[in-house]
Amino acid sequence: MIGIISRNCFYRQNDLVAIVRKCGFLGVSSSKLINSSPNMSIIQKRGALIVLEGCDRAGKTTQCKRIVESLNSAGHKAKFMNFPDRSTQFGALINSYLTSKDNFTDEGIHLLFTLNRWEAKNEMERLLRSGVTLIVDRYSYSGVAFSAAKGLNMDWCKAPETGLPKPDLVLLLTLTAEAMAKRGGFGQERYEVPELQKKVMEKFQTLKDDSYWKVVDADKKEDALSLELCEMVLDSMESCSDKPLGKLW
Ligand code: NYM
Ligand code: MG
């Protein structure tokens, strides 16, 4: 894929200067001082923690990967991450639950999803400190929204997430029921049923905190959505770099 940012420069001449400026500023950094030579010090900016949330079929995974590709091709350090991370030992248990090969209580699977984030915490913090922006496909909000949609108490669900790195920006991708239906059927996993997805969306609305969330209508062409998201991501990367990383909740 050609970087969205370069395509954007081609299609939207007026935005060129602003976007290139945003792309350029990240070459310099500010939260950590690194002595690269005896006479010169470069300031190391931390990366941003950006999370994409929303229901299944909203296009989160595709968009996360497109954003990372665009940022990388514009010279920024960015990495894709996703939760659940099914590649770990706990992730394998989550996978067997989601594919109905295994069963857990609602509380048990909730804690496994949370544990799957705690096992990634140190690596996430290390990458952020070293200036890598993380573009994360689902996070604690999915954890709380899905479990609360199944009937667990929301405060109970939030408690074990306390202390995890707080995203600088949450992009909530929304789709109307009609737009969701047009995208074709859900897969075969647990939770992939319209009634639960509707409840999950209501829980996301309860969790939404306008101080760091943005709601984005995902019912548009992939390129247009990528462009919209990339601009928000670049803004967040710029504004968070000299602020300390927060903690949930
Ligand atoms: N899910 C995801 C949860 O129930 N709790 C969580 O903490 C997370 C991260 O897992 N239907 C649910 C939402 C999805 C399912 O996610 C699998 P994905 O992104 O389809 O692999
Ligand atoms: Mg899914």
Image (cartoon, rainbow, N blue to C red):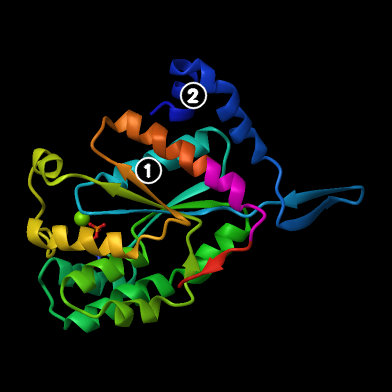
Residue 236 appears in the figure: yes
Foreground residue, 145 or 86? 145
Amino acid at circle 1: Lys
Q: Secondary structure at mark 1?
A: helix
- Residue 219: give its label: none
Dividing the picture into quadrants, the one containing residue 137 is bottom left
The answer to whether residue 84 of the structure is visible from this angle is no
Percent x, y of residue 69: 44, 38
Viewer-proximal residue, 234 or 41? 234
For the residue labelled by badge 2, is the local secondary structure a helix, a strand or a loop? Answer: helix
- Residue at 45%, 23% (x, y): give it: 8
Image quarter for ligand 2 equals bottom left
Q: Position of residue 212 (x, y in %)?
A: 47, 56
Residue extending farthest to the right is 39
Compared with 152, 38 (above or below) is: above
Q: Is residue 187 left or right of residue 89?
A: left
Asked if the magenta segment contains residue 240, the reply would be yes
- The residue under label 1 is 65
Q: Residues within 10 Å of mark 2 (few under 14, many from 20)?
A: some
Dominant secondary-structure state across the stretch colored magenta: helix
Which badge, 1 or 2, is on the more N-terminal residue? 2
The three-letter amino acid code for the residue at tag 2 is Ser
Quarter the N terminus occupies: top left
Q: Is residue 64 left or right of residue 42?
A: left
Q: Which residues are magenta?
A: 235-243
- Distance from label 1 to label 2 (Cα)? 16 Å
Query: Within the image, what quadrant is residue 76 found in?
Result: top right
Residue indicated by mark 2: 6
The number of numbered badges drawn on the structure is 2
Percent of width and height locating residue 125? 55, 65
> Residue at (26%, 32%) from the top-left corner?
220
